[in-house]
Amino acid sequence: MADARADILAAVRAALAGVEASVDPAASPPGVAAGPGTLDLFCERVADYRAVVQRCGPEEVAATVAAALPEGDVVVPEGLPVEVEGARVDDGLTALELDAVAAVVTGCAVAVAETGTIVLDHGPGQGRRAISLVPDVHVCVVRADQVVPDVPDALAALDPARPLTWVSGPSATSDIELDRVEGVHGPRTLHVVVVEG
Amino acid sequence: MSRTFVGMPAFPVAARTALADTQLRHNLAHATGVIRDKRARVVAEVDGWEELRLAGAAVKERALHGLDEHLLTLERKLTANGATVHWARDAEEACAVVAQVAKAHGADEVVKVKSMATAEIGLNEALEAEGVAAWETDLAELIVQLGEDLPSHILVPAIHRNRAEIREIFLRRMAVVGRPAPDDLTDEPAVLAAAAREHLREKFLRARVGVSGANFAVAETGTLVVVESEGNGRMCLTLPEVLVSVVGIEKVVPTWGELDPLLRLLPRSSTGERMNPYTSTWSGVTPGDGPQEVHVILLDNGRTRALADEVGRQALRCIRCSACLNVCPVYERVGGHAYGSVYPGPIGAILGPLMRGTGDPQTDSLPYASSLCGACFEVCPVRIDIPEVLVHLRSKVVDAHRDEPVPKPEAVAMRGTGWAFGDAARLGLAERASGLVGRVMGRLGRSSLPGGRRAAGRLPGPGAAWTGARDLPAPPAESFRQWWARTDGGRADGGRTDGERADEGHVEEARDG
Amino acid sequence: MKVALQVTCLNDALFPDVGKAVVTLLRRLGVDVDFPEAQTCCGQPMVNTGYLDEAVPAVRRFVEAFDGYDAVVTPSGSCAGSARHQQRLIAARAGDPALASAVERTSPLVHELSEFLVDVLGVTDVGAYFPHTVTYHPTCHSLRMLGVGDRPRRLLEAVRGLRLRELPAARECCGFGGTFAVKNADTSVAMGSDKARHVRETGAEVLVAGDSSCLVHIGGLLSRQRSGVRTMHLAEVLASTEDRAEAVR
Ligand code: SF4
């Protein structure tokens, strides 16, 4: 295998003989600008994916989340700032155990208005990747100050060393006649609770 | 079990078979029509899409031009992040690594998230030969795998299948490899998707080894990126203890920030969405979260050959969005199988010959599988000038045959044409000969063109390819240059430029053809 | 301004009326267009089939023939595209710096007819009269290689008596594609048949386009199908006036 490495690198160098590589990162045009409409845009774009979006004040979060939860077991990550009554705090549940859980409540790291995306970096309040994947309902609490206008802002705010999951609506497929259908392997219901103020 | 593309006929022959399949043409026209409109809508809402395309091209260009350095950085970062990096010159070496990892863990099955690289290297077949079952988990890949079919599209490998056919495949085949489809399965896309969810869930929950590709590999941070829709990718990347990712060396993106134009370009170009449902990124091993053993295979398999081609290397910018397939009028009519490769459509017509090299008849037919209409270039998010590369590859095919003792009839014709075009006098002679033909045809040919111009009906020999379905107007009695010389540009003909000799009786001004 | 007509090899040999129409039209607009008789072809038929060496003589003749003119007008999007975008590659292939610099001089002077009328002469109403129902097919090279945009449409809309019908899926290729039409005849015909069907759907009497090559393909299908729809080059429609109208039934 050491040979493969040397051969490939040699072939790359031979192919590029005489080619100058630019040292500076390529610049990208700015994304949409921040403005008073950013939060509205985010909510609109999330709803476009047929996710449920609700806006509430800080004191209504617990009730809004509770109302969004289906019957059955709920799992939450450690460090979730929202009180979810009766929820089990993840302590390394197996995939099979998670499959028996009806819903998960998490926070997020960043949200993107232009694309209606929430990004989890799986830190405190968000939990391991598996817990927001296997249960069929994902309730995600987004603070208004976590919403950035566009993709470049999100990349700048995120830590690439962490595993990241960018979520834009419920799981979906366009594999049958290129018609979009919501709900395949990931959570079939995405419920976004936006906390303002 | 699954089929491979080896031994496919050359494009024109395969296309003829595909064109005769009316169901296929209907499925393709419908699906490509839907996705074209979706793409056009979401692209139109972006201000400065062209600047974004330029940025996307610039990022990939920079990545390719410094590829050796970026690959070394990527390897270093991945290793520091706890991943194991392998290098594979070809398909065989890459498949061997995956098989070895699976066996080291005693796994007799792996779950796979859709990846062009693993399809390209024939990983499923290689694993099967080693007694390891590879389960495709992307809905379209599942349809292809269960149907013992071949992929026909980069993004939606089962694009050639309609809902009724998919229902039939699920009913017949799911039970053979796992959880059966429910008896009351309908052909509603939502119901079919639900059946796939149930069928695959048991496989996800028990899988110990996951296999993926990567859309991007960020050198600076050692981060792999997988862009997907269904969540099957997240399942494969998260639940197994071991993850093996097969990554073409051209997937490198130098820095984290340079993902920006690409993440904005890809979903809109690909599925016609502002953002795809799920994008996962991981940088090696994360303690306590996801696979604790992570392998990355850096794959060449012809990429360095493509890189060495100065005109063709731009094809390595491709981010596999499939927009070029969806707008291609040739692809729309013949589908993906006719290209005889996992990479169909316009990008396939250049990538195959660039990676494999020209020389066999099937590969050599691919650069000609295009009318050079340019629709692909117009939509490509990384501005690959596919028509330019097609023409370049045609010249490679031609050049490879230059020294043959007996040249092909086409080469003789082209040389003759080139010779005539080298001198106006020679061209004039050729035209006079054709005018003679025209006069004869004018008397004998059938007069079918509206307006009365004589037409050639079905011609024998090489002309048959044209006249099988199309009339051909008979050559006029006088070429333009003859007319110009005879009349001094109409000035000597009473100033007439209306197309007829002054001495001829009837005036037929409109050309019909 | 010294203006030369590049008639194109196809129009020269097969559709001389298109060249005559350009002459008529330009003279009517006060341009005394010249036809340099040394011209042959832009080189595209060879280039697009992969025969680059064979295209070199044609490119040489091209730059020689049009040397010294202020503008070259051609009734073909495809040939204008070839002159502006492909000839420099051929010059590079020939390894001839003199040819390369000649190409650099000539190629920016080459205008497709609608570009010449709208951009150089600054007219959209060319004084034409054409009392027929017409549909317009924008050819791929004029659309995507040159970017002529809506210039041909604006010219047609200004023609008195002309009724323009929208062509469905207008931007889609007709399937001609040079030697593609014979190398991949089945696919070419499948594409052309859809185009011909869309043309028939419009109910137009005449299909108009700016490239004789695409017209000979679509027209060949329309004719074989006995559709009764005739094809005309944009130049021929724009050259028509009341005096000449009765010739066009
Ligand atoms: S060539 Fe361009 S349009 Fe085609 S799949 Fe690749 S990136 Fe997309």
Image (cartoon, coloured by chain):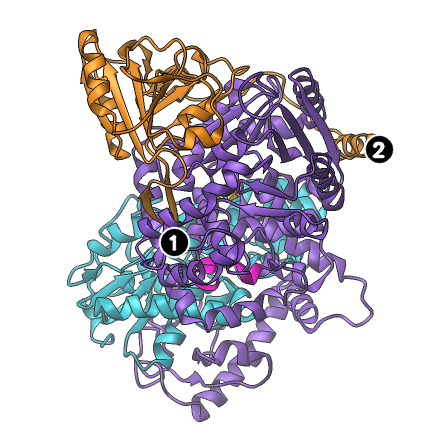
Q: Secondary structure at mark 2?
A: helix
Q: Secondary structure at mark 1?
A: helix
Q: According to the image, label 1 marks what residue?
A: B32
Dividing the picture into quadrants, the one containing residue B399 is bottom right
Q: According to the image, label 2 marks what residue?
A: A3
- Picture coordinates of residue B485 (x, y %)? 49, 69
Dividing the picture into quadrants, the one containing residue B509 is bottom left
Residue B308 makes an appearance in the image: no
Q: Is residue B315 magenta?
A: no
Give the camera-side residue of B196 and A24.
Answer: B196
Give the camera-side residue of B114 and C117.
Answer: B114
Residue sitting farthest toward the bottom: B444
- Picture coordinates of residue C185 (x, y %)? 51, 71
- Picture coordinates of residue B314 (x, y %)? 60, 38
**Marks 2 and 1, Cα distance to the nearest angstrom?**
44 Å
In the displayed structure, does residue A115 sit left or right of residue B430?
A: left
Q: Which mark is residue B435?
A: none
Answer few, some or many: residues within 10 Å of disc 2's Cα (few below 14, many 20 plus, some between 14 and 19). Answer: few
Answer few, some or many: residues within 10 Å of disc 1's Cα (few below 14, many 20 plus, some between 14 and 19). Answer: many
- Identify the magenta region: B328-339
Give the main secondary structure of the magenta stretch: helix
- Picture coordinates of residue B387 (x, y %)? 54, 50
Supply the letter of whichever chain is orange: A
Residue B392 drawn above or below residue B106: below
Number of marks: 2
Supply the letter of whichever chain is purple: B
Dividing the picture into quadrants, the one containing residue B369 is bottom right
Locate the C terminus of chain B by quadrant: bottom left
Residue B40 makes an appearance in the image: yes
Give the camera-side residue of B1 and B437.
Answer: B1
Q: Amino acid at mark 2?
A: Asp
